[in-house]
């Protein structure tokens, strides 16, 4: 416990976790949100605060490989776990195939949704390396993009999934 | 920003229950946090003590009892687990189908079935389906355990039959008989559904032996359309009958005008969704159509 500015006791917890593969230890208040922890404490600005109500997906990070809304998840919840943000996706200076595909398919306009989109897609492909277009749409449904119209995003994810051209699935299903 | 609170990490239901009793209205059960943290962020509610029941082992398990043909779903089972569980896919595909539509992939990864039911948000997807299914909820405290039919559990908007210090432990589902099937239909314009309908039909030689129809999201709590169920029993699932039953369910609804739509619009939705759900349930019961 520590004494707050207005004399109210502020409980503290110590958390150890891994962020993008690196061990992190911190003393935080249980009320600290994962998004603030990542942005304000660790300077990882890839996850964005937007709707702040876990609707839009701009703050998506992966917690033990599953997408969560960092804006509505306690940093405490990440104790003992692995957090992956967009900053941790490139390996040895080489972009992740999804990042490369987003560039190649012009799946980015303003870029605000992009880190969430890519991380969500990464989680899908890890579980399900060859999703159908319908499965990609279902998984990405909770990530909103107000610029692209989604089309190029779908194409980018499909190109990495290998579900597309090799398997003749692009355009096969009604959109 | 969230207000100041302390997190407690109990090892057992009993310990969690005594913490809840000790701190009374200052305390809330913390599970997935997808509902609780939202209202705390919006300052609609504040609790100085969150009792994290995720530190209690074994509350997130799904098991099947082949003798009793029941599924036991731990309160901390996430929507995602239910969406992907092989036990659920085998024995209750309708539940997986509904769960795959809850919120979005992030909400499903964190949110739990127990949290959803205990929060009693009127637009809950699971509440509507589980009400049609006559699920039984096992709750416990540091003193006793008891089982509550879900119809007696969901009392109203954000209101359940849980007593102070009581915690939902698991959800018991009786598998549908082989000649029964169901369907879940909803319509959403926002993140949460505007109207939800679940239909379960049991057919014997082309005649409806049992019918259960639940409607949710349009009122303070999901409800069973009893008159419609009565109309359906003993009849063949013909288009006209389904239309009349859907009309009855729509009349039984008591919607209000809000951001999701006007009361008139919601009644219309209930009628359309009920007809779709009943029709699909009937076709599935006759093995014409499979689950998604």
Image: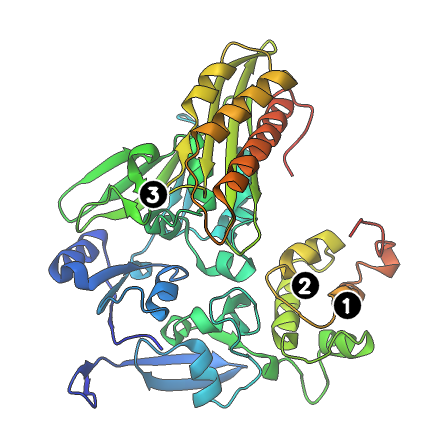
Would residue A167 appear left or right of A36 to someone viewing this image? right
Are circles 1 and 2 on residues that touch, CB within 8 Å? yes
Residue visible at 32% across and 83% down?
A: A28
Quarter of the image for residue B281 reads top right
Indicate the position of residue B230 as horizontal and vertical percent values.
45, 16
Looking at the picture, tell me which residue is in the foreground, B57 or B280. Answer: B280
Indicate the position of residue B215 as horizontal and vertical percent values.
46, 35
Q: Is mark 1 on a helix, strand or loop?
A: helix
State the mark number for residue A35.
none
Q: In this view, does A38 lie above or below A134?
A: below
CA distance separating discs 1 and 3: 40 Å
Q: In this view, does B221 lie above or below B201?
A: below
Chain at numbered mark 2: A
Looking at the picture, tell me which residue is in the foreground, A48 or B32. Answer: A48
Indicate the position of residue A50 as horizontal and vertical percent values.
53, 75
Residue B234 visible here: yes
Residue B87 visible here: no
State the mark number for residue A160.
1
State the mark number for residue B170.
3
Chain at numbered mark 3: B
Ranked by sequence position, the earlier of labels 1 and 2 is 2
**Tag 2 residue:** A125
């Amino acid at each position: 416990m520590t004494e707050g500015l207005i004399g109210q006791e502020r409980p503290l917890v110590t958390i150890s976790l891994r962020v993008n593969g690196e061990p992190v230890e911190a003393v935080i208040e249980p009320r600290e949100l994962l998004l603030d922890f990542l942005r304000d404490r660790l300077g990882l600005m890839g996850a964005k605060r937007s709707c702040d109500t876990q609707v839009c997906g701009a703050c998506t990070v992966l917690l033990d490989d599953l997408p969560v809304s960092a804006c509505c998840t306690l940093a405490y919840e990440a104790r003992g776990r692995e957090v992956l943000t967009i900053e941790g996706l490139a390996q040895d200076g080489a972009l992740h195939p999804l990042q490369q595909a987003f560039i190649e398919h012009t799946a980015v306009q303003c870029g605000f949704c992009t880190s969430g989109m890519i991380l969500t897609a990464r989680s899908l492909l890890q579980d399900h390396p060859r999703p159908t277009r319908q499965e990609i749409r279902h998984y990405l449904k909770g990530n909103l993009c107000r610029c692209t119209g989604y089309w190029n995003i779908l194409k980018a994810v499909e190109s990495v999934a290998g579900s597309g051209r090799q398997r003749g699935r692009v355009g096969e299903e009604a959109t | 920003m969230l207000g100041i609170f302390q997190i407690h990490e109990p090892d057992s239901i009993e310990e969690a229950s005594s913490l809840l009793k000790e701190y009374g209205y200052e305390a809330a059960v913390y599970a997935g946090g997808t509902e609780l943290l939202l209202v705390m962020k919006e300052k609609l509610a504040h609790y100085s003590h969150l009792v994290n029941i995720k530190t209690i082992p074994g509350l997130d398990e799904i098991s099947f009892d082949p003798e009793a043909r029941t599924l036991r779903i731990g309160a901390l089972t996430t929507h995602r687990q239910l969406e992907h569980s092989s036990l659920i896919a085998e024995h209750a595909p309708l539940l997986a189908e509904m769960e795959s539509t809850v919120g979005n992939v992030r909400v499903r990864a964190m949110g739990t079935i127990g949290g959803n039911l205990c929060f009693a948000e009127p637009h809950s997807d699971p509440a509507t389906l589980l009400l049609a299914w006559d699920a039984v909820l096992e709750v416990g405290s540091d003193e006793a355990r008891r089982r509550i039919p879900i119809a007696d559990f969901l009392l109203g908007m954000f209101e359940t039959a849980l007593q102070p210090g009581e915690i939902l432990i698991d959800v018991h589902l009786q598998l549908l008989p082989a000649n029964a099937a169901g369907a879940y239909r909803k319509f959403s314009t926002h993140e949460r559904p505007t109207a939800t309908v679940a239909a379960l039909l049991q057919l014997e030689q082309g005649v409806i032996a049992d019918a259960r129809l639940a409607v949710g999201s349009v009122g303070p709590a999901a409800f069973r359309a009893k008159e419609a169920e009565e109309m359906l029993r003993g009849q063949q699932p013909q288009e006209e009958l389904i239309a009349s039953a859907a009309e009855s369910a729509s009349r039984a609804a008591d919607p209000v005008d809000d951001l999701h739509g006007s009361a008139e619009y919601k009644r219309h939705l209930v009628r359309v969704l009920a007809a779709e759900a009943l029709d699909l349930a009937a076709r599935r019961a006759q093995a014409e159509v499979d689950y998604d």
